[in-house]
Every structure is written in C-alpha cells, then in structure tokens.
Image (tube, rainbow, N blue to C red):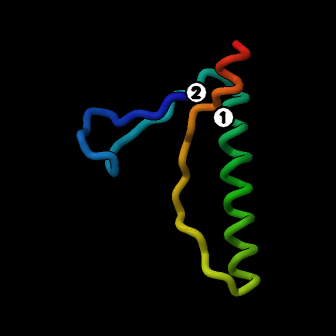
C-alpha cells in the first residue's frame, strides 16, 4: 500500500492511496472498522475520544518476508 499526495505540496489536501491487492484494501477496511468501534466504545463509556488520525506505517516484518 502506498500513500502519496497528488500534485500538492500540503499534506492536508488531495492524496491518494494505491493498493497492490484486494487483501491490502480489506486490511485497511478492517483496521478502520476497529478504530471506529474503539471510538464508539470510548463515547459509550464517557471517556474522551482519541484524535481521529489514521497513521499508516511500514510493516517491516512483512517486508523482510518477501
């Protein structure tokens, strides 16, 4: 999975995510679903909601296995 800005110098405008496989897209969906469930639980428990920031980091373990 690659994320990059498209023709913009600012990171808060127009970006795209390039997927190499359907499984990468499903992994992102599952990760976002988990994030949403966590935030909903925080709200139900009366806790402060975490920042709504999704960070994509290189999975070094998978890179080594290739």
Residue drawn 53% across the image and 67% down it: 51
Residue drawn 66% across the image and 34% down it: 25
Image coords of residue 33 (percent x, y)? 71, 54
Cα distance in 3D space between marks 1 and 2: 6 Å
Asked if disc 1 and disc 2 are in contact, CB closer than 8 Å, the reply is yes
Q: Image height check: is 55 above or below 49? A: above
The residue tagged with tag 2: helix, strand or loop? loop
Q: Quadrant of residue 9?
A: top left
Q: Which residue is mark 2?
A: 19
- Count residues near mark 1 (Cα–Cα under 10 Å), then give few for <14, some for 14-19, many for 20+: some
| Quadrant where the N terminus is found in the figure | top right
Image coords of residue 20 (percent x, y)? 60, 21
- Quick one: which residue is furthest to the left in this view? 9
Looking at the image, residue 2 sits to the left or right of residue 7; the answer is right
Q: Which residue is mark 1?
A: 25
Image coords of residue 46 (percent x, y)? 70, 87
* Mark 1 / mark 2, whichever is N-terminal: 2
- Quick one: which residue is furthest to the top in this view? 66
The residue tagged with tag 1: helix, strand or loop? helix
Q: Quadrant of residue 63?
A: top right
- Count residues near mark 2 (Cα–Cα under 10 Å), then give few for <14, some for 14-19, many for 20+: few
């Amino acid at each position: 999975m690659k994320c990059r800005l498209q023709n913009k110098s600012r990171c808060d405008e127009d970006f795209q995510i390039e997927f190499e496989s359907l499984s990468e897209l499903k992994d992102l969906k599952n990760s976002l679903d988990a994030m949403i469930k966590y935030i909903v639980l925080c709200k139900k428990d009366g806790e402060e909601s975490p920042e709504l920031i999704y960070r994509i980091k290189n999975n070094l373990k998978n890179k080594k296995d290739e």
